[in-house]
Amino acid sequence: MQEADGHYKESLYNGRSDHDHQGETMRYIRPQSIEEAAGLLASAAGPAAILAGGSDLLVRMKGGFIEPELIVDIKAIAGLSEIKETADGFSIGAAVPCAVLGENAALKKAWPGVVEAAKLIGSKQVQGRCTIVGNLCNASPAADSVPALVAAGAKAVVAGPNGRRTIPVEAVPTGPGRTSLAKGEIIEAILLDKRAPNAGDAYQRFIPRTEMDIAVVSAGVNLTLGEAGAIKSARVALGAAAPTVLLVEEAAEVLVGSKLDEATLERLAKICAGACRPIDDKRGTIEFRRKVAGVLAKRVATTAYERAGGK
Amino acid sequence: MAGVAVSTTINGDHVEYLCQPDETLLDVLRDRLGLTGAKEGCGTGDCGACSVIVDNRLVCSCLVLGAEAEGRQIETIEGMAHGDQLHPLQQKFLEHAALQCGICTPGFLIAAKDLLEKNPSPTEEEIRFGLAGNLCRCTGYDKIVRAVQDAANVMKGA
């Protein structure tokens, strides 16, 4: 290693790179507190970007879609890289990589649907960096973790120059690539409720290959059962079926009171297919997406029901 | 030279460098530190040719900023062999001819090392899934999978 070490030192003193004439107007700052981060973002004169995992940001920078004047790396802020189990449930920090979600046994047991959705994002390399808050704020209609979070009734803790507010996850994306966050606001954490007994969630997507692709359509379902095994409460969310994630309340109403018999599943499929407002593109036609949304809703509801202890 | 001053550890060695805020860790490794083992295939996190391990996590160095390396522990392909002694994975890649053009090989080796450290006895499916973030356009993957299986056996016996 001596030789390599010598090489590093030489590089430090003599190393020049093509980069030295670039990036001179860009600033990279790693603040220690959320207040400092919010202040930096709020006072930025030009475009500013929040960096957690960077798996969307760096690709967009490389492609020239964004040229931030300021990059605020939030990973040094205390608590943002932790999953906390509280009396109310779980608080997942904004900088927690998705791989860490999959390694948290308590979270996996309580919210298997959220974890399985987060684990579908990208390769192992991307899993080591990508975050659910990044997935949410990238605001892609096809984001995998978002329908699962919406079905789970997850909330986002938003910190900004005027303090904190807690909003439902579905209030964050407002359209492809757009969010409701104001200048200077940062999502600090995602909150998941403490799990009721006899409850389960699940997520699935359709892709034309087996792994590592963008959802053509997806569905997340979260169910709580009553004592007799009938569904007491339900949330059904569809991804890649509209400009933003769809929370299909009519689908949830059909499920409540049922034991997920065949007729209920058929009604669920019909409602989900009808609720879609998908695009027609090379990955799927409108007709195909509608049909698959219904099929996935049935399958995902069945898995969630089994996980809740039904059947 | 204006830039971000970074102090980090690469393959066990303390390293300091200056880089631009928009410069990736891959560019720092290759262009400033002369560590050209990690390759730029796509530059967008799709191919895995630039794989390195940062604080025990496998990542694409093209999706990490050089400035983010501050205080981290980084492992690259250059740290895999001990002098002339190849890592069992490197030896088995040679024996199984698990490479042709070689561009993807450093990334595969690093990803396979990470895989076997976390799962010393992976099934074929686990190997294929674990290496799915690394693309190879030459071998058809079979020889790579066999080499990793063989290396896993050697490493378990060691």
Image (cartoon, coloured by chain):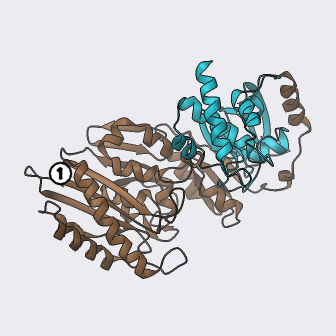
The quadrant where residue A273 appears = bottom left
* Residue at the extreme left of the image, as rendered: A228
Q: Relative to residue A70, is residue B35 drawn left or right? A: right
Quarter holding the N terminus of chain A is: top right
Chain A tint as drawn: brown
Q: Relative to residue B16, is residue B130 drawn left or right? A: left
* Residue at the extreme right of the image, as rendered: A14
Chain holding disc 1: A
Between A138 and A226, the one lying in front of the other is A226
Chain B tint as drawn: cyan
- Label 1 secondary element: loop
Residue at (37, 77) in percent of width and height: A290
Between B26 and A80, the one lying in front of the other is B26
Coordinates of residue B140 in the picture (x, y in percent): 68, 52
- Under mark 1, the amino acid is Gly
Instruction: Look at the picture and state if A280 lies above or below A245.
Output: below
Q: Relative to residue A154, is residue A242 drawn left or right? A: right
Coordinates of residue A67 in the picture (x, y in percent): 69, 63
Kindly identify which residue carries mark 1: A310
Instruction: Look at the picture and state if B13 lies above or below A116.
Output: above
* Residue at the extreme top of the image, as rendered: B158
**Whether residue B54 is visible:** no
Residue at (55, 53) in percent of width and height: A122
